Amino acid sequence: MKVGFIGLGRMGQGMAGRILGAGHDLVIYDQIPKLLTALGQAGATVATSVAEAAADREVVIDMLPHDAALESLVFSAGGLLDCLPKGAIHMPMGTHGIEIIRRLTQAHEEAGQILVAGHVLGRPDLAAAGQLSIVPGGPAEILRNLQPLFDVLGKQTFVAGAEPQAATAVKIAHNFVLGCAIEVIGEGMSLIRKYGVEPSLFHQVLTKGLFGAPAYEVYGQIIVDEAYDKVGASVQIGIKDANLALAAGEAVGVPLPSCNVMRDRLLGAVAHGDGECDWAVMAREQARASGLE
Amino acid sequence: MKVGFIGLGRMGQGMAGRILGAGHDLVIYDQIPKLLTALGQAGATVATSVAEAAADREVVIDMLPHDAALESLVFSAGGLLDCLPKGAIHMPMGTHGIEIIRRLTQAHEEAGQILVAGHVLGRPDLAAAGQLSIVPGGPAEILRNLQPLFDVLGKQTFVAGAEPQAATAVKIAHNFVLGCAIEVIGEGMSLIRKYGVEPSLFHQVLTKGLFGAPAYEVYGQIIVDEAYDKVGASVQIGIKDANLALAAGEAVGVPLPSCNVMRDRLLGAVAHGDGECDWAVMAREQARASGLE
Amino acid sequence: MKVGFIGLGRMGQGMAGRILGAGHDLVIYDQIPKLLTALGQAGATVATSVAEAAADREVVIDMLPHDAALESLVFSAGGLLDCLPKGAIHMPMGTHGIEIIRRLTQAHEEAGQILVAGHVLGRPDLAAAGQLSIVPGGPAEILRNLQPLFDVLGKQTFVAGAEPQAATAVKIAHNFVLGCAIEVIGEGMSLIRKYGVEPSLFHQVLTKGLFGAPAYEVYGQIIVDEAYDKVGASVQIGIKDANLALAAGEAVGVPLPSCNVMRDRLLGAVAHGDGECDWAVMAREQARASGLE
Amino acid sequence: MKVGFIGLGRMGQGMAGRILGAGHDLVIYDQIPKLLTALGQAGATVATSVAEAAADREVVIDMLPHDAALESLVFSAGGLLDCLPKGAIHMPMGTHGIEIIRRLTQAHEEAGQILVAGHVLGRPDLAAAGQLSIVPGGPAEILRNLQPLFDVLGKQTFVAGAEPQAATAVKIAHNFVLGCAIEVIGEGMSLIRKYGVEPSLFHQVLTKGLFGAPAYEVYGQIIVDEAYDKVGASVQIGIKDANLALAAGEAVGVPLPSCNVMRDRLLGAVAHGDGECDWAVMAREQARASGLE
């Protein structure tokens, strides 16, 4: 396929590399030119503008860090809305809010273009290995046509529904479930510590029992080791994720009280100077709230 | 070992059967005589009072449904405190609160007896198969002597610490983590449903990803199937567990906001007539709170 | 009337003094004999047992600090249930839980006695001045007969209903509303402090506007002055009140999420060493949670 | 003074009328021309653009419904930033978020203009009567010069601080305290109703005791009367206020758990079709959550 790829950060780098490696015709673009060097040398066409990255493409993928960047990409003068060919597909694959995805869906449709959401689960190492999970949302036929790309990027695809926002909701809900799991581990850890139990013992009870899954294994271990300085997702990203969930809930009348708890814990971490730590530092903030630190 | 076993309900039946099957000298007692028939026929000695069940025993195990039953067993006239031999062990294996375990620890010690907590994780079928997880708390040497019993009852043992209440805290924290996981799945499910996503799709995203563990697989499936009438643990038991966690937190100054959320959801289920359902009905109560039912 | 009064603490002292001063025939009793001296010298008959305090009385009032004391007063051997004359009234006026009031109501009825709840709002100085608010619950005719006592003790009477527990619920709900008001002031204070606003300014905005009432005036001022060491109601009493409210809610299927927030804040205060302070210290605990202390 | 006034809705109408009545030189503007008729006939100069409303003015006041309107007023082409004279004052008096006020403060300063926040407490009838409470924030000298305007508009002025955002925080915190008070009344009402107590009785206990202030008198009465269809502030405005408070807290690391409770209640009201009611309908939503409706 003729693919454009915009946003060559850590995730984008690995994903675009997979697409190129699979033999697709790839044009890449990023506001930071040096991010384009490696893939350019590997055979990708390096664009110097959004317009170049979109011209004659069947699909333009973007992997951007927040809604503001996505909004700018699409709606600014010379943005995707202006330069994406009619009938072509725009597929954001980063984590975004419901509202921006809704606006893009409508705007692209009015412009004769197609918006598909292609959210992913997984970190940069999985992206580079094509082992992501893909959660796309959009018209069934369009998604079928994109399946070869999904197969290159991920190990499994979960079609959320015919509306892009369905996929967005799944992605947001997934991160919400993860954040709450971390919060709850932290609460449990503070409780058992006050009774003289070793965190590692409780971690074993969980992971060798009903909770033997990566979410608990990985984050439980970070909490046991208090390894909060090695940052996967930061407290700030956690707050962003919490806000996306709360906004998604608000838009459809769904209270999410567990999300409030997670968000408050993250804010407390910021208040106590842990804002740049991994979001598993929620467990330390809970310990602090319990008089343990 | 010379073992007394009091409380032959669904869990106790399986556990006592394992002990008998392993060749231990077993005396059994329950207030409901018919619960003693099967094991009596299988070779256990049937006692007609707590005193008979405790006389000359090295260890008396009990498996009782709540703190009031345990308090009565120990502190009432002719109870365990009166009739357990000096130097013998009393090991409650049900789910109990911190405060009763503390009181028993002290009372037995003053009477020259030994209190060991032997909480278990797992349901009746696992109990009958000797596949429970055992979380004991008590003096290390005593626990070593009890290890043959743990090996017969469970597949793995997690020694919480030298104080019985350490084990109690672990058991309580474990159930708390489970209840919160169910609550959070429910919140996520309501969110994605409002965006037109099938619950089963979200269940797959979770369990084929970071949450591929029994807690999410089993309870997620119950929620997908809305199979709340097949009751494993009821809403009422969930409320009891939540209260145990909140009391345990209060006793040591640990706020557990996620537990509040779970408890409120369970109370809401009661308010709307779902009090006798499986506690996974939290997901339906969340749906109700979101205007989905 | 022939009145017995049990529990001559700070509140009871003032209340019993009012009753005596109004010319009623008063017998007093307390487990701590020296608490009886002053009123004995003033003309009250000093009893040396509950039985003496109840014999031939039309009504026995008690003012006890917690449910355990009330349970013991009524249900222990030689307690009120045994020695209160048939047809006589027992009126607890302290703060108690729904469950104990329900049990007393039933037990007294079965014994041919009458339980009336006579909860009060106000502190010792108001008690001594007969300026309490009385919230009684019980059969209308009985309450009418007790009105002369209410008039001596209080400035106003709010009849909650024909069941004693109705009054108990009102008393519990009242304290809950107060505790939450303090919590919310504390949250607001932390917020405005972070924006450089003086707490006293915010206190004025509230009390010279929509919140010009004692709850906000008094507690707001304590918070502005950080005068937490002068203890009216302590953190521990606050936790007791929160637990009474949560138990009352649980008994009838009412989630009280604001009460959870208050309770968690009070637990946090305990965790950080403020357990003996006035419960307005919730505001300091909130400040701590916000990184302000 | 030479005053421009933009935004002649219900609040603005009354406020601008007061300014005109006090003899100030008033230019008015609104996107909806018919809103300008009455004051134009009364002597105000009617502008047909923001530029006209700002030209040669010492101070331009606006009273707009939300941040988007304020942003547009200032930052759009031909907006206040372009046409307000150097040295002149822009004073938003509506309810806005911290972030927009910060941005305006900086932008106006860079343009040689002055931003002062002049938030008000009170509804349209108080606005028309000059009985608002004014909460201004800005440089002390500037505020002193504006005092004659404050005196015309309000009965009292509470200077929050030298930074405009200080006043914004006070306004936001005030509304937050009010919303939480309503939520807590609602929780208490559901509790006592379940025990057979009349809402009006509980309302009296509160307002004739520690809570004898307009917040409780007015909103308690609305709740007693279930008069939710007469809308002062709607659920949607309540959600907006809650979001402003949560965002203000997030910006400075202050968790506001009581605000979460209020917001969830309001979202529940939306989910159950009460989104257009007065925000006191939180009490009905709480009743619903308690199985009472």
Image (spheres, coloured by chain):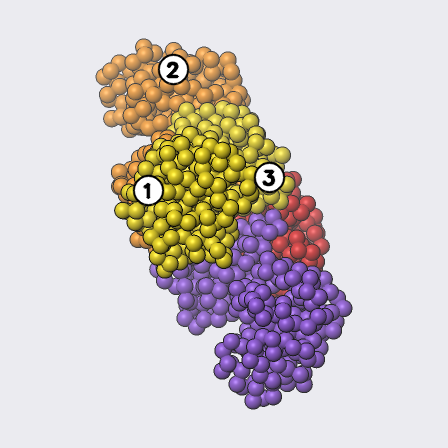
Chain colours: A purple, B red, C orange, D yellow
**Residue C240 in picture, x, y percent from top left:** 41, 39
The nearer-to-camera label among 3 and 2 is 3
The quarter of the image holding the C terminus of chain B is top right
Q: Are marks 3 and 1 on the same chain?
A: yes
Q: Name the residue under label 1.
A: D146
Residue denoted by label 3: D276
Percent x, y for residue D82? 43, 56
Q: Are marks 3 and 1 in contact (CB under 8 Å)?
A: no
Q: Residue at x 35, y 54 (%)?
A: D86
Q: Residues within 10 Å of mark 2 (few under 14, many from 20)?
A: some
Distance from Cα at disc 3 to Cα at disc 2: 46 Å
Query: Could you tell me which residue is drawn at 61 percent across and 78 percent down?
Result: A53
- Apparent side of residue C63 relative to residue A17 in the rendered image (left or right): left
Q: Mark 2 points at which residue?
A: C151
The residue at the far right in this view is: A141
| Classed neighbour count for the residue bearing mark 1: other residues with Cα under 10 Å, few (<14), some (14–19), many (≥20) | some
